[in-house]
Amino acid sequence: MMARPWNFSAGPSALPEPVLRQAAAEMLDWRGSGMSVMEMSHRGKHFVEICDQAEADLRDLLGISPDYAVMFMQGGGLGENAIVPMNLIGRRGQPAADFVVTGHWSTRSHKEAGRYGNTHIAASSGTATEIDGREQGPWTWVPPVEAWQVRPEAAYLHFCSNETINGVEFTDWPDTAALGAPDVPLVVDASSHFLSRPMDIARAGLVFAGAQKNAGPAGVTVVIARRDLLGKALPICPSAFDYANVAAEHSRYNTPPTFAIYMAGLVFKWVKEQGGVAGMEAANRAKADLLYGYLDSTSFYRNPVHAAARSRMNVPFVLRDESLNDAFLQGAEAAGLMQLKGHKSVGGMRASIYNAMPLDGVRALVDYLRDFERRHG
Ligand code: PMP
């Protein structure tokens, strides 16, 4: 087999190689069933086993209590931006939800929810500010929790715990009781750092994640929801997207993305073998420290995010001389470093170093950064 290059894509992104190999080995005959997982009935005993095992492994990995439903759904992150409000926004009467806006994805979530009810921005980092005597540009910092202004009557408070494009990550999830809003559950879009570190699910009312970054292939969205919040969907909510239905049928209310769930299940097993989310966190910290450490050691490259808010998963950076961007990307590809181009809304570069990226891949990137700077600096 040809050597696989290092893939820094923001998603869909690299999957652990052992997972791909296992899927390949089981492709035509899943464990003596004589069938590919793709060919199985979603209600047959084999797929039920696959799906229930995936759920059990995920519960184990994150320590999810039985008070929470775990659902494997379709629609991706943007789908959830509508599915969440359709399910939750009217649960306390007048539809109303609050948002902490810290970048591209939470901005999109806020906008979409406005189609279903009244929305309010509890905090935003969309302006420049000064932190520790340094100017921080828009979307490069996290608003301090003490400054969040949450309406006590809101149905929920949404935030994005890792802004994939801006490279901003929340390390702690706040307690809404301390914000004077004890009845307002958190809704967390954890798409791009799911399973990269321990997460206190019990702090949230609902957590969702598109699988295609850290948890599997595109096509399945993981939703973890406190059961007491379900069953109050708006009448317009499609029944296939009503969490109460999906939870009651263990993700098999309608035909779920069976193969994607199987793949996610293989990824969950792999994460367990790496020492679970604590093991992943240690590996991810080492990778992020190496990359940020190098970026900070030179003025040739720059990451604009405030140190305390830097994402361990998505590392945007710019070259001091942007006219070198094309040469940088061409040289990177020639060196086997793929998909480093930044999102069009922020420009520059971005290295996504999800769970499946080994430390060796980040070492190869840092070697290239150093070499490119030596040749062009
Ligand atoms: N939220 C976050 C944090 C994301 O990174 C993305 C995708 N990059 C989305 C939402 C949108 O997800 P999807 O493309 O699956 O709709």
Image (cartoon, rainbow, N blue to C red):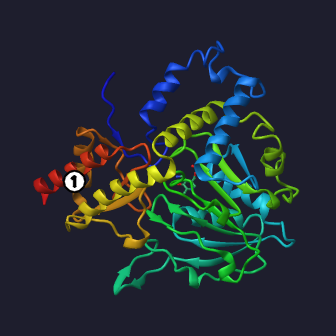
| Residue 64 rendering spot, x and y as whole percentages | 67, 53
Q: Quadrant of residue 95?
A: bottom right
Three-letter amino acid code of the residue under disc 1 = Leu
- Is residue 220 in view from this perspective? yes
The extreme bottom residue here reads 133
Name which residue lies at 61% across and 35% down.
260
Q: Residue at x 57, y 84 (%)?
A: 146
Of all residues shown, which one is farthest toward the left? 375
In this rendering, the answer to whether 193 lies above or below 99 is above
Locate the N terminus and report the quarter of the image it occupies: top left
Q: Position of residue 155 (x, y in %)?
A: 77, 70
Q: Position of residue 364 (x, y in %)?
A: 25, 45
Q: Please tell me whether residue 249 is drawn above or below residue 202 in the rendered image.
A: above
Residue 240, how many percent across, how many down?
A: 80, 44
Image quarter where the C terminus lies is bottom left
Which residue is at a point 40% across and 83% down the rendered structure image? 131
Task: Out of 359 and 13, give the one closest to the viewer.
Answer: 359
Q: Secondary structure at mark 1?
A: helix
**Residue displayed at 82% across by 53% down:** 237
Residue 199 placement, left or right of 347:
right
Q: Quadrant of residue 33?
A: top right
142 w.r.t. 325: above or below: below
Q: Which residue is mark 1?
A: 369
Q: Nearer the viewer, residue 114 or 67?
A: 67
